[in-house]
Amino acid sequence: MVSRITTVAFRGIEAVPVDVQVHVGPGMVAFTIVGLPDKAVAESRERVRAALAASGLALPAKRVTVNLAPADLPKEGSHYDLPIALGVMAAIGAIPAEFLERYVVLGELGLDGTLAPVAGVLPAAMGANGIGKGLICPEASGGEAAWADADMDILAPRSLIQLANHFKGTQVLSRPVARLRGNAGVLPDLAEVKGQESARRALEIAAAGGHNLLMTGPPGSGKSMLAQRLPSILPALTPRELLEVSMIASLAGELAEGKLTDRRPFRAPHHSASMAALVGGGMRARPGEVSLAHNGVLFLDELPEFNPQVLDSLRQPLESGEAVIARANHRVTYPARIQLVAAMNPCRCGHAGEPGHQCRRGERCVTDYQARVSGPLLDRIDVRIEVPAVTAADLIGPAASEPSAVVAARVAEARSIQAARFLELGLACRTNAQAPASIVETMTRPDDKGLAFLRDVAERLALSARGYHRVLKLARTLADLDGADQVGRIHLAEALSYRGEDMSRKAA
């Protein structure tokens, strides 16, 4: 007899249906799994055998063959345990096979028959809902699955016996409840930052338009402190953004107890991170930090200490909003619409340009260190600022800085203006930084004085086409913060001032 159970394989954040076919028939006693299983799937036969025995069932003295179709699609992960076990139970008549036809099944089995949580339950639930089926998953992942659809049929048992009793009618499983994770602790507040008024202004502008930001300054000037306070002025995730972020986190196994949070991601990998860790990849082409920061912030501290090749691998995700991982046998695409925030010292010793400091290596210390960050990557950063060392007078002074709540209100107002503009244009963009080049000039519309000023300065600074459009986007954000309908000369001048020291040297 052949029984069939539906489960999923993951291709990026897409859940691809997989047909688990179980045949129990005559022949040499064996338990075989075919269909390109990886090591975790191949080992599931031992977990299934022990879990069935713990549940009071024994495998028949026959040949058991499990085929995972389509056979040419690689199968990875431990979530195939439960569909294989249910397929065997249906094949030997322990549970009615017709009950299982309405569900997509995934879960990892313990040797005692209990179900352990697995990665990717939320994308699997979305995929199951898309093909009109319910979902069977472990109890610990039920809250995560419940976000897919309020009317979707979801079973989340603790063990194999509990699920079998539900199908027999001796026990009823209630539908799991979608839950939000309580925000742990209060975010660091901008009120704790003393001095650094220009850096605070740049941080607000970057938050308002979703612009990439680079801060350069000596050690201890507050670059990391400022970056860590960026999430406190960013708006909460919208429901659509929340779902996108949670699907990626689910695949990475980072949803604690199946609970979602509406805080924007803030990822800060160490500078020793590999290319696979940052962009994604590895044996199973898992999402990297750039995708886990989707709709949030990717903070790279000590930017030049990263491997230059690893940094340059960010250029394509920053431009397209996607991380594409290509391998010989498959190609995976993950969303990666991020806001890049980076911090660096001016040189290896960290004190170049400070009064009274003289480096023994001279100008070479600066040029060699900064050359580790390529020009094309810098061209994708809209706001580049100097963060000078804070003086003792700033630290001792009693004056309190503006709190994050006040700044966040201005950021939210600017973002609502942008959302209304993009809705009117029929675009799916959410911030000015995401606007396609084709509509940048339409949405900015500088006045005559601003246009003449921009034309003159762009020629003298030799701005690239990308740099030109990024200046216009930044000027549009500045106008939105001011509540202005039209971009003026003052907005363009401030936007150009954030292009960095290299531009001022070029103009000279």
Image (tube, rainbow, N blue to C red):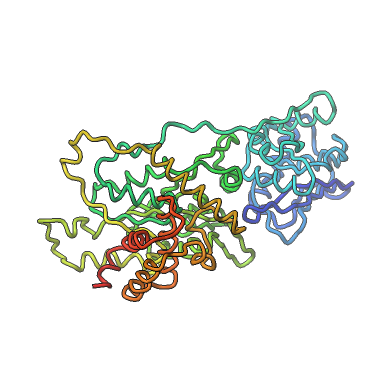
Horizontal side, residue 102 vs residue 452: left or right: right
Q: Can you see residue 309?
A: no
Q: Quadrant of the C terminus?
A: bottom left
Residue 258: x %, y % from top left: 60, 36
Residue found farthest to the front? 448
Residue at image position (77%, 55%) is: 69
Residue found farthest to the top? 170
In front here: 335 or 59?
A: 335
The number of discs equals: 0
Residue found farthest to the left? 356
Residue at image position (30%, 63%) is: 500
**Splitting the image into 4 quarters, where does residue 305 fall?**
bottom left
**Splitting the image into 4 quarters, where does residue 256 fall?**
top right
Q: Is residue 332 above or below residue 95?
A: below
Residue 329: x %, y % from top left: 64, 65
Residue 289: x %, y % from top left: 48, 52
Q: Is residue 170 above or below residue 188?
A: above
In front here: 422 or 194?
A: 422
In front here: 487 or 263?
A: 487
Q: Can you see residue 85?
A: yes
Horizontal side, residue 366 vs residue 238: left or right: left
Horizontal side, residue 74 vs residue 56: left or right: left
Residue at image position (56%, 62%) is: 325
Residue at image position (49%, 50%) is: 293
In front here: 101 or 266?
A: 266
